[in-house]
Image (cartoon, grey):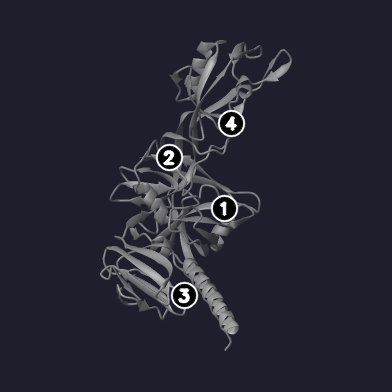
């Protein structure tokens, strides 16, 4: 073979090797995440076959790799990958092609099993924000012109007013009282806007119709609604609910929580969902306080319930194991929710799609309601159902979070593992 032909053959082999390496790396990244959590005795299975794939690692007493202890020396992977939790601890895996082309590093943590009491209870939610929220502009007539001094000064809908002329404000009545005392003098506002504090100065104007000086804002300090409890941890007395952040209904901005509480609620009416028209539960609050709200986050609301005794019937009165994100599967499942009174019932759903997530994120799965009774009563997923726990194979796997407006039979769910982790984080 001539030298030119050898050179050409060398380049062809190099190109094929690079292509093969890229393909193998893509297959590994698509099939196995970098951080895996499993319980002792639990398994993580990946149906992937890559020729000449090798692995080495540490933690032979932590996991079993394809049924055998993990070796520090290179071993060839001749079958789909199966990891089984053996003892609590951490193991590290290094995958390579031919044993010398690195492809992916994976960390496996074997963690203690968690058991939680499933929710499904309808709850009333009461929130009070830091300061007072700007929910609209109030226009009034001055010399034939419609004005709002605050709007002209740069105040925006969604802002939170924390102080007025150095005086802290925690509710709308106190803000109105301070502004009334100031009258027509210059006003300096300390405002929180998306986590940043800014100062805005303005001059109130006299409104003949109101016979008073006005800055031209509509303010609100509280929010209330109906949702669903997701889980309760009997060891810590902490709970999680909703599975998503609570937004101000006027501004669509997250409510900057100052204090809040949950109460027991009774469902008295259902407005069924239709394509393009979200449905909703109507509930009445049946007591003053059941638990507090300490956090309003992207993964739900969290707090403590000192006394969890609750008289509503439920299909699952005892704690269930919590499924880790990697354990959830596509296929049949059920949700727990209330559609009448305070009775918690189970309804059939199908988990249609899963997102591979190694870190907390919302929208981890897509579910579809297949229960004929629930479809007849609610049309699918409706407002007030957020937080309804999802159960699969005897484990708590997630919570309902959002509905597809154009197809209310389907919606998003969050992995319960992320809600549980958020409940364990320090409260703000």
In percent of width and height, residue 296 lies at 44, 41
Mark earlier in primary sequence (2, 3):
3
Return the residue found at the far right. 144
The CA span between labels 1 and 2 is 27 Å
Disc 2 vs disc 3: Cβ atoms closer than 8 Å? no
Lateral position of residue 365 relative to residue 40, left or right: right
Residue placed under numbered mark 2 in the picture: 286
Discs 1/2, front: 1
Q: Which residue is mark 3?
A: 48
Q: Is residue 22 above or below residue 213?
A: below
Between discs 1 and 2, the one toward the N terminus: 2
Q: Nearer the viewer, residue 274 or 329?
A: 329
Name the residue beneath numbered marker 1.
Answer: 403
Q: How many marks?
A: 4
Tag of residue 74: none
Q: Earlier in the sequence, mark 1 or mark 3?
A: 3
Q: Mark 1: which secondary structure?
A: strand
């Amino acid at each position: 073979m001539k030298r030119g032909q050898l050179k050409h053959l060398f380049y062809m082999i190099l190109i094929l090797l690079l292509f093969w390496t890229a393909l193998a790396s893509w297959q590994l990244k698509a099939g196995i995440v970098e951080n895996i959590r499993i319980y002792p005795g639990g398994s993580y299975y990946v149906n992937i076959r890559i020729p000449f794939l090798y692995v080495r690692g540490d933690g032979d007493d932590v996991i079993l790799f394809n049924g055998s202890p993990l070796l520090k020396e290179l071993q060839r992977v001749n079958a789909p990958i199966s990891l089984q939790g053996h003892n609590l601890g951490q193991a590290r895996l290094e995958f390579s092609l031919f044993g010398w082309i690195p492809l992916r590093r994976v960390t496996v943590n074997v963690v203690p099993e968690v058991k939680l009491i499933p929710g499904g209870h309808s709850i009333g939610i009461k929130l009070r924000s830091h300061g007072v929220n700007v929910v609209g502009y109030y226009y009034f007539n001055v010399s034939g012109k419609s004005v709002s001094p605050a709007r002209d000064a740069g105040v925006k809908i969604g802002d939170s007013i924390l102080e007025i002329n150095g005086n802290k404000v925690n509710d709308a009545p106190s803000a109105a009282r301070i502004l009334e005392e100031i009258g027509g003098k210059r006003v300096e506002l300390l405002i929180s806007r998306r986590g940043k504090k800014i100062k805005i100065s303005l001059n109130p104007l006299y409104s003949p119709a109101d016979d008073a000086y006005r800055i031209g804002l509509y303010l609100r300090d509280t929010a209330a609604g109906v949702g669903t409890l997701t889980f309760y941890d009997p060891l810590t007395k902490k709970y999680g609910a909703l599975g998503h952040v609570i937004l101000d209904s006027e501004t669509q901005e997250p409510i900057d929580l100052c204090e809040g509480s949950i109460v027991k609620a009774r469902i008295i009416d259902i407005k069924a969902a239709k394509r393009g028209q979200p449905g909703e539960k109507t509930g009445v609050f049946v007591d003053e306080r059941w638990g507090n709200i300490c956090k309003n986050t992207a993964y739900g609301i969290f707090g403590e319930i000192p006394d969890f005794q609750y008289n509503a019937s439920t299909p699952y009165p005892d704690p269930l194991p919590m499924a880790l994100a990697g354990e959830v599967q596509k296929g049949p499942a059920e949700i727990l929710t209330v559609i009448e009174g305070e009775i918690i019932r189970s309804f059939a759903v199908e988990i249609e799609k899963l997102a591979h997530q190694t870190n907390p994120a919302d929208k981890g799965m897509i579910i579809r309601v297949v229960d004929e009774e629930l479809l007849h009563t609610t049309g699918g997923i409706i407002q007030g159902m957020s937080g309804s726990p999802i159960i699969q194979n005897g484990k708590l796997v997630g919570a309902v979070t959002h509905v597809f407006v154009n197809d209310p039979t389907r919606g998003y769910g969050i992995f319960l593992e992320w809600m549980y982790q958020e409940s364990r984080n320090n409260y703000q």
